[in-house]
Amino acid sequence: MNIAVKAEASEAATEASITPLAELNPAKAERFQDDTIWPIFERLRREAPVHFTADSEYGPYWSISRWNDIMAVDTDHEGFSSAEGIGLPNLEALKEQERVMGERRKGGAGFITMDEPQHSAHRKAVSPTVAPSNISNMAPVVRERAGQILDSLPIGVEFDWVDLVSKELTAMTLATLFDFPFEDRRKLTHWSDMFTNMPGHGPVTSWEQKGAAIFECFGAFGELWNQRVNAPPSIDLISMLAHNDATRNMDMHQYQGTVVLLIIGGNDTTRNTISGSVFALNKYPDQYDKLRANPSLIGSMVSETIRWQTPLAHMSRVATRDIEVGGKMIKKGERVVMWYISGNRDDEMLDNPNAYIIDRERPRQHLSFGFGVHRCVGNRVAEMQLTIIWEEILKRFPVIKVVGEPTRTYSAFVHGYESLPVIIPARV
């Protein structure tokens, strides 16, 4: 950690400790970008694990920061609804998207923003594509592509790991899941970034540009729907939706919302964990040594990275009735934010949770995929990609060196990396 980064972290810790508790707003995107959010969550877990922020850029909301309280909310799909969105809604963004896109601004509701029983019916439609049998069929193709990506990397020259590896592998896999034109796969990456960023961040330069990109995405997937609905059923996600009784007659807004969900979910979790694994292993070189000495630890290392990184920092719900959580009364209609990124550092549930330890006794004990009916449908696909890329890395490179601070995503939702400068000194 360089001097400037240390100073920034110290300043953030001081601010977190002296700010009146009622004024704390843990969803400030700049704190996530600077990686200085941790003192705030430490204070919330200690002093106010169920905390109310009365005024913010997202409006009022409750923060749930401890593991057990998060589990209580996440597994109560009747008491806490997803129908009004799963992320904190930035009020300025909603106004601007309304201005630029009108009725097209949201693309309707994907199944993650549906309640039961509609949610499970729509989720079931895409489940065969990410079922173990199909993942097993995909794995050799993913392995071949991972090898091609790694073999193309420069040796002894600095490059951006996020761009050349993390984005490329996830784009290839997502194109396969959609049966999307392979030569246009990086459009999926671009659209994901356009959906999740505000102007001035990521690739987004203006609301108009963002609106045009979203319109282009919906147009492309509208064409895919028309192709698949008139063709024999196949195993890709679009065909599954087009031929399932529960989804084939959904309106186009619902379809578009599902496309947004699948693009973002298929991109961000895996790509930011791939980047996070390289960063974490450099931050904890003893763990990198441990991994090289014992490649059988790859599976547990993947799970530990998913916990330590927490690629989606939170999920949001709205209370359907007055309901008590952690001794606080949450009123009907109030928004509740489950901070997975905080729960994954809860020392009441995990030993030494801030450390990165690749051989933990129970490495799959984390909140990153959620729980209950909304648990991540593609978690096994993510784990498969992460396992394969590291199996192939260890065959090829003695070490991957991080040579500078990463540029992190400006978001309180997507917890990731825009760039990560690395050098690979030599091949095996």
Image: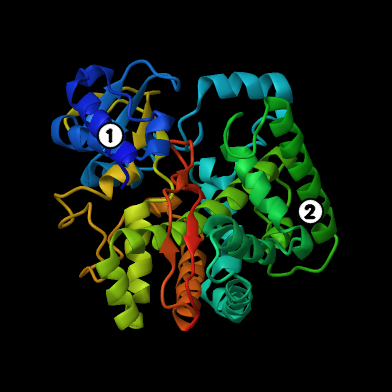
Query: Residue at image x 23%, y 56%?
Result: 355
Classify 144 as above or below 273. Answer: below
Task: Please state the horizontal and vertical placement of residue 184, each as a whole percent of the image.
Answer: 77, 58
Q: Amino acid at mark 2?
A: Trp
Asked whether the viewer can see residue 242, the reply is yes
Give the residue at mark 1: 7
Give the residue at mark 2: 225
Query: Residue at image x 60%, y 52%?
Result: 262
Mark 2: which secondary structure?
helix
183 relative to 280 in the view: left or right: right
The number of callouts visible is 2
Task: Please state the horizontal and vertical placement of residue 377, each as a whole percent of the image.
Answer: 50, 58
Task: Please state the horizontal and vertical placement of residue 428, each as a whole percent of the image.
Answer: 47, 84
Q: Quadrant of residue 76?
A: top left
Q: Nearer the viewer, residue 261 or 158?
A: 158
Which of the two discs, 2 and 1, sits closer to the camera? 1
250 relative to 202 in the view: left or right: right
Query: Mark 1 and mark 2 in contact (Cβ < 8 Å)?
Result: no
Q: Residue furthest front?
A: 156
Task: Please state the horizontal and vertical placement of residue 416, each as a whole percent of the image.
Answer: 46, 48
Q: Amino acid at mark 1?
A: Ala
Q: Nearer the viewer, residue 274 or 25?
A: 274
Disc on res. 115: none
Classify 13 as above or below 379. Answer: above
Query: Residue at image x 26%, y 60%?
Result: 356
Mark 1: which secondary structure?
helix
